Image (spheres, rainbow, N blue to C red):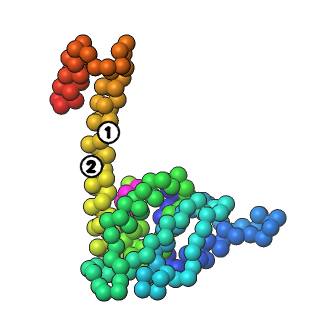
Amino acid sequence: MKRVLVKSVFDTFDYVMQHYYPAGLEEMVEKSDTYVVISIQDSHTEGFGITFSENKYCKGVLTLRFDDIIRPVNGAILFSKDMAIQIIKFIRKYVSVDTLLIHCYAGQSRSRAVGAFAVKMLGGDNSKYFTQHNPNMYVYKTLERELEEIDAETEYKEPINELFFAINKNSQQKDARFSEKTIPDMDKLLEDFCN
């Protein structure tokens, strides 16, 4: 991703419409970057009444409904671990598009937290997100925690997967069953893996 943009729902609509052109007049398009949208909408109104969809320029949309709160509140939805995982997977899936466009109602708290997280996740400097407006720190910290957990799980799984692949490959030699001859090889694999 070349850029992460955080906007209000109104400015997001304007940005999306800059990618529109009348039939046969593609040269009139204002913007032609590829983008994906993380659309954060309020739960108490069941959304904003606007949904975004994929098209020639928009390659993906993730719509989440949660409210701008930092602890449980009756009638509102708190940002969750599941939502954080969805965002992380979405960013990873669409890392090759030009623009990650994130909006909430005002573009100042929830979407700013997701934007700050996305910039950091992509290896950038997210300090500006903390000097302008007030990102929802509950959202930001939840995203950070989930990314650490996912990355730790991945770091753990990759060597284990390599070990099982090696064991499986070893077991398929001549005889598809484990024999006394293959057991020492497996012991060596386990020993190498543990060291």
Mark 1 Cα-neighbour bin, 10 Å: few <14, some 14–19, many ≥20: few
Residue 158: assigned label:
1
Residue 84 magenta-highlighted: no
The residue at the point 31 percent across, 31 percent down is 164
Dot 1 falls on a residue whose secondary structure is helix
Task: Specify whether residue 124 is in view.
Answer: no
The residue at the point 18 percent across, 31 percent down is 194
Q: Position of residue 4 (x, y in %)?
A: 48, 64
Which of the pair 187/191 is nearer the observer? 187
Measured along the vertical axis of the image, is residue 83 above or below residue 98? Answer: below
Q: Is residue 68 rendered to the left or right of residue 64?
A: left
Residue 169: assigned label:
none
The residue at the point 51 percent across, 55 percent down is 94
Dot 2 falls on a residue whose secondary structure is helix
Main SS type for the magenta part? helix
Residue 152: assigned label:
2
